[in-house]
Image (spheres, rainbow, N blue to C red):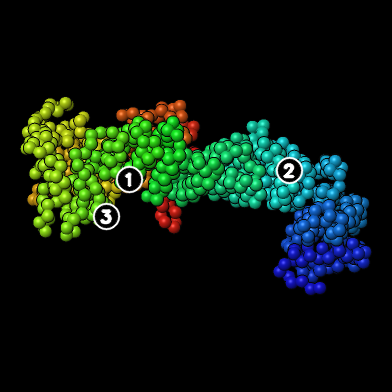
Amino acid sequence: MRFPKEKPIKHFIYRSAMLSSALAMKKFSLERELSELTSLSFQLSNSEWNSTDSSLQPFRALKLNVAKDPSLLSVSSLHALMFSTLYHKFDSSLTRREAVLIGGLSVAGNRCVRLVLSLFGNPNVVCLDPLHSLDTEYCASNHSNGAQLKIAALLINSTTASRQHDKQSLMNVLDEVGILPTHVLAALLSIPASPELLGLLVDHTVMANGGHLSASLFSLLLGSLLSNDNFFSAKYFDAMNTVVRNHILPRIGESHAYFDYVSIRWTPLMNKWARVYAKKVKGRELYECYTILLKKAPAVETKLPPSFYVRLIGLIMDCGVDKGATGFPSSQDCWKRLRDVAVQAIRLFGGNPKDLHAVWMVLLKAALTLEPLSDDWQRTLEAYHICAQSGHLVKVDRGAFLQVIRLVGAVIARQPLDAVETTVSKFVEFLQEQRNASFLWILDGVGALLSDLWNAHGEDARPHAVLLQDTLQQLLKDRNVAGVTLENNPTIKRMLEKFSVGEATPFWWQCGCGAELPASSKRCVSCLRSSTNKISWTCAECGERHYSPCHCQKCKCGVVNPRQNKAAKNGYTLCNNCGEALPQGNTSCPRCKRHNVDTSRQVACRRCNFCHGANDLYCPSCFIVHDERPLQLWHCAACHEYNYSTWSTCQGCRATRKAHCIRVRFLPWLCGCGSQNHPCRLACGTCSSCAPSVGGKKSTPGAPLSPSYTCVTCQKKCSITNITRDMIPSGDSSLQIHMCEHCKAVHPRDRVVISASSLPRHCMVCSSVVDRHLISVNGEFSHCGTLQRLNENIPFRCLHCDGTTHLSVGFHCTNCGWPRPEVEEAELAYYVWQCLKEHSSDSVCCGAWNYS
């Protein structure tokens, strides 16, 4: 039989199988077949063995090394590979004992092992080789190979012989062997032998290595055992898992030995581990091994790949869903373990949008599918809470938000009134954390839940309705949403009237589109949302669409607008100026009167005593905001201008304000000359000879263009046209900062902006996002038992990068990786740093936080 040259190993194994069958039929002797096989190997490798003594050919065949024939990796690995192949059984339906009794290859393989051991396990036989008759080193090496052959034979026969006999025999052989070569050890551990013997082999290897488990040895042992077919057997899986959990993992870091976890290739190892356990749906066992690994080496968490966490979460979920799987004691225990892993994964990889999405999808699926299904709403809200607490908020879309509304509404309808309080409280917490949700979704969702409360519990649910109303009003106030009140929303207003919350509306009017609205609503909510042109109301007669608020105007067809018509029928009139509904005969509008009084009234600033109008948003002299009318600024991501919180569109580029835009307090900035200036201006009023733009508005035509300011650091005057501009990351967006043209110091206005408590701050010990309420006015906060004053949002220039003008933010230099000067001066033992490397595919920063 001729074999091609390109696959000598496979054909050698196949030839060995033919050899064992021939031995079983007693047609050929072992020496003859090995001699023929040696001649074939010589032809393939062009060896120069010209001895005519055929009795030496078997010895020379097993002595071939890599230099003679690269296809035969080494003697020891070849032995283990051959014996494991001989033990292979073709019929998978047979048990191991049945295969041994009637399987030809198994019987022949066992006999071949005994014959080879009788020949090569005896040093006297080996020394018959005239080339090495006096070579003691060769004899010792061959004696080691013989011991390795005995180990392979014991492992192969371990499933048929007496366990106690195999155990004692293996212990006797291991006493004769020192440290096994890595390729031999890997081959032996991959043999589907008795798990008890594999455990003995692992213990011997660790003891031979000095009693401690090094990183390379850990990777070798675990990777080899995971390649064992016993892991895919229902009979031996638990025993193999015991070897990993009790013989390998507890030895990590024993006797305070250093464990070089950085040198291990964790990604392929952990993915292989997760795939092997997933085949048998062993989520609980994998979770236990994961907890032991982190307990023995906590720093390993920074090296585990996100794909392993995704597989682990999915496997735990499968154990909870699959009723036939032997997993966790209860569904609550399964969710608890899954939640702990998800918290760890989101904390480590939440900065990467792709990794966060992968973890979130598995977490959300588990929350919706685990038993009992009646608690799906609670698990879903808890999943959103986990992401919010870790500082990596999941951007909820309209479909996901409506899903939460449906889940909460369903549980409100079936729960007793006593349990509704917990449900409403958790939903309120969800609303407060979802800063990216549109306020229109929130209005519609709260209106739907108010309807569910009334339909299920009636007047008794009034306290819960009041809680939802107060929460919604606070959310609108915190987001500085202008022009939107609960009284103008038809669904919420009708439900609040049923709960007897607030004053009843004087009348309801119907728009031409069919929507019914309260008297205080001057615009139709349905018309506003159905068009991009901000239509206020539709004529019921001709269908004409009107853009101005529904006051006292008429349609082109001569029909009075529906709001005025309904007011007249109910004994009300509309104010000609503001459109407020007034009782019949009342000609004085209280709203207009109050506005007129405030316009003419003068008040004194509480700080500089400068007199200004009562309707002014701030003092024009010192730029201090009124306490009664708090003012904030929001950042336009399109043109990087700052606008008043009362404006819904940017005054510079007319872009619409986004729900997740950056918001900062209205605070003046101090120029180097000592003057306080408007927070929307870059130029100082004292240093400049013109009045620059405010809030993105263009400056007055014809004004001299010489805006400037005095740098606080170098005390030199800087022209606005010559300052340097740079972009720094801030959360999910970026900010444009301006620097002095002389010393490259950050502009005083930008320092006020980036020092705001609304920007995300991270703990330099655990990298978690700090709650803004814990940050003081001075920018200090206490976290992880440490008082932290360092604001990582303030840009810095690295002292170790020579000649660079690059600015970095965070706790380390993005160019050389050196800690920022404040961290270096503090001489901290450790800190966290954020990876800002861009992906080659979509140019998105990695964003992962790591330990130093």
Q: Amino acid at mark 2?
A: Ala
Question: Is 163 left or right of 423, judged from the image as shown?
Answer: right
Give the image location of residue 512, x and y in percent.
20, 54
Q: Is residue 816 left or right of residue 193?
A: left
Tell me the mark number nearer the camera, choosing from 2 and 3: 3
Circle 3 Cα neighbour tier, 10 Å, few/some/many (<14 / 14–19 / ≥20): few
Residue 174 point in image, percent of width and height: 81, 42
Q: Quadrant of residue 756?
A: top left
Residue at the disc numbered 2? 239
Q: Name the residue at 71% across, 43% down.
A: 238
Can you identify the residue that label 1 sits on? 444
Q: Is residue 116 visible?
A: no
Q: Is residue 11 visible?
A: yes
* Residue 603, image x, y percentages: 11, 28
Local secondary structure at mark 2: helix
Q: Which residue is rendered at x = 30% and y = 46% of the image?
A: 440
Callout 1–callout 3 Cβ contact below 8 Å: no
Numbered badge on residue 530: 3
Mark positioned earlier in the residue sequence (1 or 2): 2
Relative height, residue 214 to residue 82 (above, below) = above
Amino acid on which the number 3 mark rests in the picture? Ser
How packed is label 2: few (under 14 Cα within 10 Å), some, or many (20 or more)? some
Q: Mark on residue 554?
A: none
